[in-house]
Amino acid sequence: MVQIPNTPTSTDVARLAGVSRATVSYVLNNTSAVRISEATRQRVHQAARELGYVPHAAARSLRAGHSRMVLMPAPAIPVGHLYGRFLSEFQWALGRLDYTVVQYGGAGLDGDEAARAWAELRPVAVLVPGAGLGPQGVAVLKRSGARAVVTVGPGRVEGAHALLMNHDAVGHCAGAHLYARGRRRVGVVLPGEPGLRDYALPRLAGVREALRGTDATVTELPLAYTEEAAAELAARWRASALDAVFAYNDEYAMLLMRALQDEGIRIPEDVAVIGADDLMLGRLLRPRLSTVHIELPSGRDLAELVDRAVRDPGGEPEVHTVLGASVVRRESS
């Protein structure tokens, strides 16, 4: 007969740490209303680790009157290294505030239909990347018990907190830089990957705004993220007479640069190229890739916004315009 070991309890943790059960609860639930010394906190955490004690999520939810789960639907678009790093910081910061972060796949679901699927999990908060969620979806989530719905994207949704990503500024930086470098026939890549349109069109609009009233022209360049598509575009390049290109981001810029070089088109002598995101790989190219450096909001700040909204679900939704942009000039432009 297999002997099943007893599950450690908070009483066991308190006994080993030499503190009360209440103190264990305060420490492991990250309660800020009670002052506890750092030495005591470390002793409690050490005891919990030694015993293999894990707080019971359902019991904590009952005591709090809501879950501690923050749901993060997986983005329907390639997020890249920059956004992925931001999400990692956000998850870490939420963990420090005693929330459990769960990523939800939900392939094939979109908008308000997706919101109904998220609501079934009864999260206390939902972080929605990109566009697609509407006011009805926000209402569904709130009726299911979500105290905070935060959207991260180009627009605001009624009833939700919003981090507005100002992608126009990215395009404006790129367009202004190319014009300052003497370029007058500017191409702008519109990526063919699904879901990127909501980001690409504001970047295109930013380039147009930067060049409005000047003698420069702007040409849209639809491009799939394949070597074949880049080679086809490069083969037509001389006929287009374009002398510069903002390639949406660094990945598309690198794809197009290689295709242009294979056609014997010199960079930057014949064509100036600039991307966005400031990826490490861009610095390793020859010529090194000029780019728009993007500043995302702090993951810690976003975690604190979520925590405020959970504590005060009736508060007015916060709206913050984020996404700083600045040009990093290198050899390709």
Image: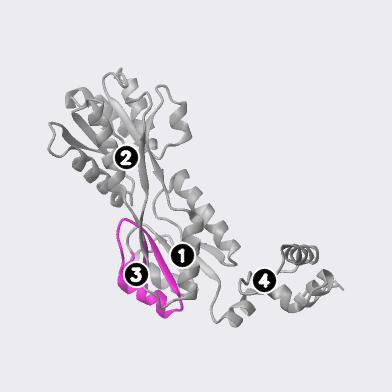
User: Which structural element holds mark 2?
Assistant: loop
Asked if the magenta segment contains residue 252, the reply would be no
Mark 4: amino acid: Arg
Left or right of 20 in this view: 313: left
Q: Residue at x 53, y 63 (%)?
A: 102
Q: Residue at x 50, y 48 (%)?
A: 85
Image coords of residue 22 (percent x, y) = 72, 78
Q: Nearer the viewer, residue 240 or 10?
A: 10
Q: Quadrant for the N terminus, please.
A: bottom right
Q: Nearer the viewer, residue 155 or 316?
A: 316
| Camera-side mark, 4 or 3 | 4
When asked about the image quadrant of residue 276, the answer is top left
3D distance between C-alphas at marks 3 and 1: 23 Å
When asked about the image quadrant of residue 272, the answer is top left
Does the rendering let one see residue 316?
A: yes
The first of marks 3 and 1 along the sequence is: 3
3D distance between C-alphas at marks 4 and 2: 50 Å
3D distance between C-alphas at marks 4 and 3: 43 Å
| Camera-side mark, 3 or 1 | 1
When asked about the image quadrant of residue 177, the answer is top left
Q: Which residues are magenta?
A: 133-162
| Camera-side mark, 4 or 1 | 4
3D distance between C-alphas at marks 4 and 1: 23 Å
User: Which residue was labeled with disc 4?
Assistant: 35
20 is higher (above) or lower (below) than 214? below
The first of marks 3 and 2 along the sequence is: 3
| Camera-side mark, 4 or 2 | 4
User: Which structural element holds mark 3?
Assistant: helix
Image coords of residue 150 (percent x, y) = 41, 65
Mark 1: amino acid: Leu
